[in-house]
Image (tube, rainbow, N blue to C red):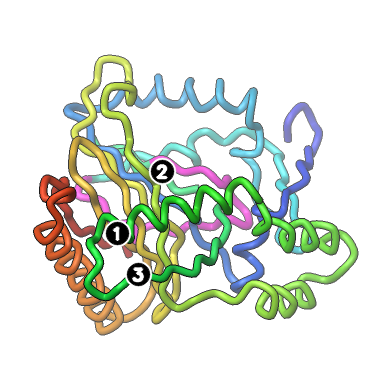
Amino acid sequence: MIGGLIVYYRGEALDFLNMLHTTGAAPLMRSRIVFSSQIDVERLKAAVLASAQIVPEIFGHYQADRNRFVVTDQPVNQVIQEVQSPYSPENTDFDFTNSPQLRFEDANVTQIANLTVNVFLTIKVDIDAPFSELVNQVHDLLTVERTRVAFLYRLSNLQKMNHTMPITVMRKMTKRWLPQPALRYTNFGVVDQERLKFHDLTVVNCVFSGAFQCSPVMEIAASTFAGTCTLSFNSTGSERDYQLSMKILENIQAQLLVWAQADAQVATTDNVTLRHQA
């Protein structure tokens, strides 16, 4: 315990939304950062402890039924774990209901496991319209939605109900109010290679991916670093589920490349790579 005290931090609507769509707990986001050489683990631990002075919740385990983070200690060795490379996340048991929410794994590769909201857009383009027209329309519609922030009103209602209704009732209401499509997308944008600094280390690659989903549900994430756009997904399922998801990802990659070649404005598009994190 911290000085003999148990500290509670109240969660917000986005903290418990994902828990309302499932009975379990899984990482909401992963980031894989590859360095040119071995990272200084002790320096990283010191940085985590310093960050906890501003965001102490990173050391807390999450209580879904009360939507709160509980901090009893600062177990930095649970947040930062040294593993052998190559590392596979399926070999690690993530217990977010009893252990810290933030995790790092080191072996020249740092992977961060730690919400977003659904935005529904109505897009109308001609079948033979250039890809740039579709991109611009999505961009304009997202700009409008962000300005209106109307997509947050249901989350505000859920937040108010969270402290008066049991979690089982909340889950039923969430499925009705906020249905989850089987296939959805998230974009983490472009990571600025010049601003991503880790002391004297050079970052060779950086990829962000979204929440773990149980097949057949799939969330495709796009992130760009050093001129390369990577499409990725995190999933739990069988080998057959994995092959199907990879096929979907390959079809999307192929279609993006077709659009890029057909549209002069996108002819110089960055490379598109695929990544699966299970």
Task: Mark yes or no: residue 91 visible.
Answer: no
Give the residue type at disc 1.
Ser
> Which is nearer the N-term, disc 1 or disc 2?
2
Which label lies toward us, 1 or 3? Answer: 3
Q: Which residue is mark 3?
A: 125
Question: Hey, which quadrant is residue 84 in on the image?
Answer: top left
Residue stretch in magenta: 85-104
> Which is nearer the N-term, disc 1 or disc 3?
3
Residue 92 included in the magenta stretch of the image: yes
Query: What secondary structure characterizes most of the magenta part?
Result: loop
* Residue at the image position 15 percent from the left and 57 percent from the top: 263
Q: Secondary structure at mark 2?
A: strand
Mark 3 and mark 2 in contact (Cβ < 8 Å)? no
> Which is nearer the N-term, disc 2 or disc 3?
2
Q: Which residue is mark 2?
A: 112
Mark 2 and mark 1 in contact (Cβ < 8 Å)? no
* Residue at the image position 81 percent from the left and 34 percent from the top: 5
In percent of width and height, residue 164 lies at 90, 64
In percent of width and height, residue 90 lies at 34, 63
Give the residue type at disc 3.
Val
State the mark number for residue 232.
1
Task: Mark yes or no: residue 29 visible.
Answer: yes
State whether residue 104 is above or below residue 231. above
Residue 208 included in the magenta stretch of the image: no
Which label lies toward us, 1 or 2? Answer: 1
Q: Quadrant of the N terminus?
A: top right
Q: Secondary structure at mark 3?
A: loop
